[in-house]
Image: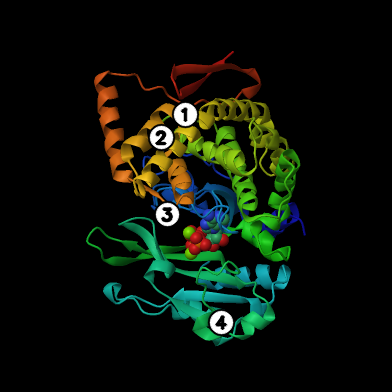
Amino acid sequence: MNSKAIRKAFLDFFISKQHTIVDSAPMVVKNDPTLMFTNAGMNQFKDIFLGNQPATSVRIADTQKCLRVSGKHNDLEEVGHDTYHHTMFEMLGNWSFGDYFKTEAIDWAWEFLHTQMGIPADRMYATVFEGAKDDNLELDEEAKNLWLKHLPAERVLHGNKKDNFWEMGDTGPCGPCSEIHVDLRDDAERAKVSGAELVNKDNPLVIEIWNLVFIQFNRKADGRLEELPAKHVDTGMGFERLCMVLQGKKSNYDTDVFQTIIAEISALCGIKYGENDKSDIAMRVIADHLRAISFAIADGQLPSNNKAGYVIRRILRRAVRYGYTFLNFREAFIFKLVEVLKNNMGDAFPELKAQQVLIEKVVKEEEESFLRTLSTGIKLLDDIIEKAKAENKTVIEGKDAFTLYDTFGFPLDLTELIARENQMTVDGAGFDEEMEAQKTRSRSAAQQETDDWVELMRIESTQFLGYDKLEATVHIARYRKV
Ligand code: ATP
Ligand code: MG
Ligand code: MG
Ligand code: MG
């Protein structure tokens, strides 16, 4: 089954269970001071859970574009190095707003994964909330008994508050959750473990695939839990992980979601995928980051020098730097991959088709501007590392890291990456101090903040005007509606 068919199968399954399918909310969040990017399917339904807004339908399902690169969920460092965390990914989800509860949520998850998609029962296990003394909560017997209809007792494991109790914040809706994990190890490997040993301990072949949250409490300001009058279901399943399982692969990157992109990267640089660890990681990082950047731009978030825009710029620069260092790219290349991404995902996400020209233009400009400074910056950093080594130091000074950031556009994590490759670290606190000092300087100079948000409703009539060079490395893209 290819990824398009898998996405459709999920949505069709929930249509058959009387769910309304809604569009993904934008990945870039405009109106929530607590969140820069959508990081879970439930974000767009927050106000329904909080009781501020009625549900338009009591049963909803969708695929949501998510980005986990900041705040509570930051998977950036895992990406490319492991095989199942992405920056941008699709979270498939189904919701009940005061309608069905645990029975249907669990039975349908089982029916979809096992009965319809054919994942063997002996490759799955479920976790349920073990209870918590401080909250006077017992084991979630109800969820456990529901799983015991489908799985043997040794495959229904207990999990603690950290893994199996979901809370939106310090107060508000919350409840126990139940996760489904898939074990892709060979039979011989699997035969060696049983019961509680089955549990996922960061083994890349034992992965969490679906999280079912049962929202049944409201946490009050004094910390007490109160039963909600209406109970809700909120689920999230990693689409790329599902594709990996159903396509019989052992890495998300080996599915058709990523393979066409990786094939294009490989064709552009002339290095085969699967031959060398470092170039493989680089190709995975680039394939991943391409998606994050393209979807962000399609949602109207251009790379810039502050807030969400800077996060996107950092991701793009990270991809450029992996390409530069490990795949020998010396010229802009990421923009050439947008076409493949659009062919893959443009049907499910038409914004990619609508914004293709803009995405390519912005990415190309960004790449070119960063490549210019990258080579100079890398030489400088090499000198700094040489000097530090000669002095038997293992830490790069915050001041140096800041110069690289300020003058050469190196995000801190890029400097840290290069440092790590040389068995060194960076003085992050020192970097922060320099950053603070610069902020104070620019505040006193009363510099005007340039808004990086543009509305892209009528993109055909938007004319790209190029970049305003504000200083050596700060480029703010400007668009004018015509
Ligand atoms: P993990 O423990 O693997 O980091 P999680 O517990 O942080 O996952 P949830 O917040 O429960 O994930 O999100 C629901 C589902 O989304 C997960 O079960 C998983 O399938 C998928 N998922 C979460 N983070 C990522 C990611 N960075 N890339 C791809 N899929 C993800
Ligand atoms: Mg996680
Ligand atoms: Mg988890
Ligand atoms: Mg989880």
Proximity of marks 2 and 1: CB atoms separated by less than 8 Å: yes
* Vertical order, 5 against 472 (above or below): below
Q: Is residue 119 visible?
A: yes
Who is closer to the viewer here, 267 or 5?
267
Q: Which residue is mark 1?
A: 304
The image quadrant that residue 206 belongs to is bottom right
The quarter of the image holding the N terminus is bottom right
Name the amino acid, label 2. Answer: Lys
Who is closer to the viewer here, 151 or 204?
204
Q: Is residue 314 left or right of residue 262?
A: left
* Vertical order, 325 against 12 (above or below): above
Residue placed at 50% from the left, 75% from the top? 127
Who is closer to the viewer here, 151 or 250?
250
Q: Rounded to the nearest whole Å, what is the CA distance between mark 2 and mark 3?
A: 27 Å
Please tell me whether mark 3 sits on a helix, a strand or a loop: helix
Please tell me whether mark 4 sits on a helix, a strand or a loop: helix
Which colour assignment does the render follow? Answer: rainbow
- Residue labelled 4 has its Cβ within 8 Å of some atom of ligand 1: no
Q: Which residue is mark 3?
A: 49
Q: Rounded to the nearest whole Å, what is the CA distance between mark 1 and mark 3?
A: 33 Å
Q: Which residue is mark 2?
A: 307
Q: Report the mark closest to the observer, 1 or 4.
A: 1
> Where is residue 7 shown, x and y percent of the image?
69, 54
Which callout, 4 or 2, points at the residue further toward the start of the chain? 4
Tell me the tag on residue 155.
Answer: 4
